[in-house]
Amino acid sequence: MSDGHEHSGHEHVPSRQRRRFPGISSRTYEHPADRSALVALRKLSGFDTVFKALSGLLPERSLRLLFLSDSVRVSDQQFAHLNVMLRDACYILDLEKVPPMYVNQDPQPNAMCIGLDEPIIVVTTGLVELLDEEEMRAVVGHEVGHALSGHSVYRTILLFLTSLAVRVAWIPLGNLAIMAIVTGLREWFRKSELSADRAGLLVGQDLTASMRGLMKIAGGNHLHEMNVDAFLAQAEEYEAGGDLRDSVLKILNVLPRSHPFTTVRAAELKKWAESRDYQRIMDGHYPRRDEDKDTSVRDSWRDSANHYTTHVKSSKDPLMKLVTDLADGAGDLGDRVRRGFGGFTNSAPKPPRGPETPGPSDSPGDGPPPRDDK
């Protein structure tokens, strides 16, 4: 629990007691697909250095100056309640250096964590005005989770490449090549959003507030008109409804998005909050940062593969069910083929039969010869 003691750079502690996670590794809350990708990248010697060198044209300094000059920096003097939330989130997730946070004038509810050298957090006025304190605390924890996981680097690259794709759209095949990379980054980033939602829950430690926040992002500030159970039922209907055409349309709808659909995020977060893994974390059993260097890429990929296998088999989506049925059918066919070949290989070859005088039962007019069913 938060003990009220001052922590390096965190003179504010939560207003109510929340469990703190000293030395917590981002692997604790990362989605299996997100985690396996990040572990593999971190294992590549000098990857981040090369990645940043190749991204030297990114206008990061310009971006920081832009927010400094045209947004409001959160501090004890400005948006003090957000500053307390930010320090609380960093205290709970044990992020020693508190990233700068800015409030940007934009009616669209949004938040992001960007930056190559150091992460910065930006929230829009639309989001600040939409959410109450506990809902906002989950969002701030979400962005601090991005910072702890190192997502800000790849998020900045994604923003830059998306902008670049628009500029080079007139060049033959230029836009196509860039959009291929952007599509891959978006797929990863959608998984990273599921990770950050979990981090937000670890910070806020209030599932109801997290659910309310997601509902408001989807439906606006009309909470009295919304219901959590009905909202989650939408995710169930989205997952299971329709036919194969709808499954294809789902894929096409999600491809241009950087975030998963809100109902899907809510369902995923609730499922994780009810899992044994979450309870173990809350009991203080979780991976530590000082163990990250010993993380096995193979184990991480296996965990990710197991997750997707389970997801596909349990999915009610028509396309996923078809894939499962085809896979099961192929397996049965393979077993039959293997058994057939096994029968040939286990039986001793027989010498060719010599010519025989047909008997009455061997007459061609009496039907096919008897089969040897051995």
Image (cartoon, rainbow, N blue to C red):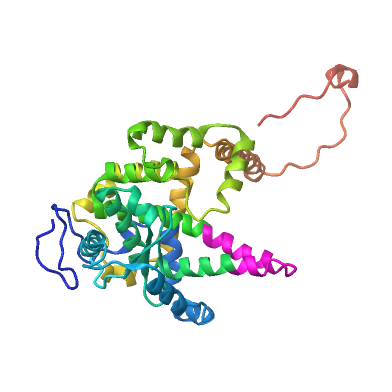
Taking 30 as reference, is 366 above or below it?
above
Residue 70 image offset from top left, x and y in percent: 41, 70
Horizontal side, residue 271 vs residue 256: left or right: left
Q: Nearer the viewer, residue 53 or 46?
A: 53
Residue 324 image offset from top left, x and y in percent: 55, 39
The segment highlighted magenta reads 164-186
Residue 303 visible within the image:
no
Residue 257 image offset from top left, x and y in percent: 53, 53
Quadrant location of residue 285? bottom left
Horizontal side, residue 239 vs residue 322: left or right: left
Residue 125 visible within the image:
yes
Q: Residue at x 50, y 56 (%)?
A: 258
Whether residue 64 appears in magenta in the rendering, the answer is no
Residue 66 image offset from top left, x and y in percent: 43, 73
Main secondary structure of the magenta stretch = helix
Q: Residue at x 71, y 44 (%)?
A: 349
Q: Residue at x 55, y 36 (%)?
A: 321
Counting every numbered tag in the picture gives: 0
The quarter of the rendered structure image containing the N terminus is: bottom left
Quadrant location of residue 89? bottom left
Quadrant location of residue 173? bottom right
The quarter of the rendered structure image containing the C terminus is: top right
Whether residue 183 appears in magenta in the rendering, the answer is yes
